[in-house]
Image: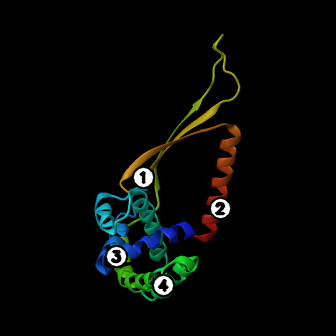
Amino acid sequence: MSPTDLSALSHLSSAPSKTALAAILNRTVLYLPMQSPYPPPPVSAILSSFSLNANQQESLYLALRRFTSAVLAQHTPTSDTTGFVREILASHASGLDPKLVDLLSTVTPSLASPWRESAMQNKVSPPSLTTIDWRVSLPRSATNSSVTSGATLLLNLGVKDGEAEKKVPLELDKAGVDSLLDSLKKIKDQLNKVV
C-alpha cells in the first residue's frame, strides 16, 4: 500500500464505533468485484457517518479496496492475519495513529475468514476471454480498385469481467500478428511443459 493509501486510512479514526469500522470493511469487500473508483451507495451511507467530504470518502474507499484485497490475497485459515495487518500498516505508518493500527489489527482478522468464504462462493476471478472475432482489412487505392500494401488484422476480443462483457478491438499489422503468434506459441510451450 502506498503512503497515500495509508494517509486515507487515517480517516478511519473518525469512525463513530468499532461496529461502523467493521461495517465499512465488510461493505468494501462486498463491492470488490465492482471496478468503479467511487463508493457505491451502501458504502457511501456508512462513510457519511464518518464526517468526511466527498473527496475524502473516495480516497478512503480506494484505500480500503487495496487494504481488503491485500488481506484477502494473504489470508488462509492458518495464517497470522493480525501480524500481516500490522505489517501492512507499519510499512509506511509513521503518521498512522497506533490506536487505529491496534483496532484494525483486532477487527480485520475476525472478518478475514468470512471474506475469503464469500469470495470463494462468489467466485471472484480475473477477466476471461469469451469470444474472438477477426477479419483482414485490405486497403484499396482511391483512384483504382487495386489492393495497396499494408493489410491489417482487425481483431475483436470479447472479455467477461464479473457480470459485464465488453469488446476490446485491436488492429495489428503483419509484424504485430507475427509478434502475437510468437508470444502465444511461447505461452503454449510453457503450458505444455507444466501439464
Q: Give above or below for 162 relative to 176.
A: below
Q: Give the left or right position of residue 47, taking residue 74 as reference.
A: left
In this view, the residue in front, 28 or 177, is 28
Q: Give the left or right position of residue 105, taking residue 114 as reference.
A: right
Q: Nearer the viewer, mark 2 or mark 3?
A: 3
> Can you identify the residue that label 4 sits on?
98
* Lower position in the chain sequence, tag 4 or tag 1: 4
Horizontal and vertical percent position of residue 40: 33, 58
Horizontal and vertical percent position of residue 125: 43, 64
* Number of callouts: 4
Type of amino acid under label 1? Lys
Q: Which secondary structure lies at badge 2?
A: helix
Q: Nearer the viewer, mark 3 or mark 1?
A: 3
* Number of other residues with Cα within 10 Å of mark 4, as a class: few under 14, some 14 to 19, many 20 or more: few
Q: Which residue is located at x 30 percent, y 67 percent?
A: 49
* Lower position in the chain sequence, tag 4 or tag 3: 3
**Residues at badges 4 and 1 in contact (C-beta under 8 Å)?**
no
Q: Which secondary structure lies at badge 1?
A: strand
- The Cα atoms of the two marked residues, 2 and 3, are separated by 48 Å
Q: Nearer the viewer, mark 4 or mark 3?
A: 4
- The Cα atoms of the two marked residues, 4 and 3, are separated by 16 Å
> Can you identify the residue that label 2 sits on?
189
Q: Which secondary structure lies at badge 4?
A: helix
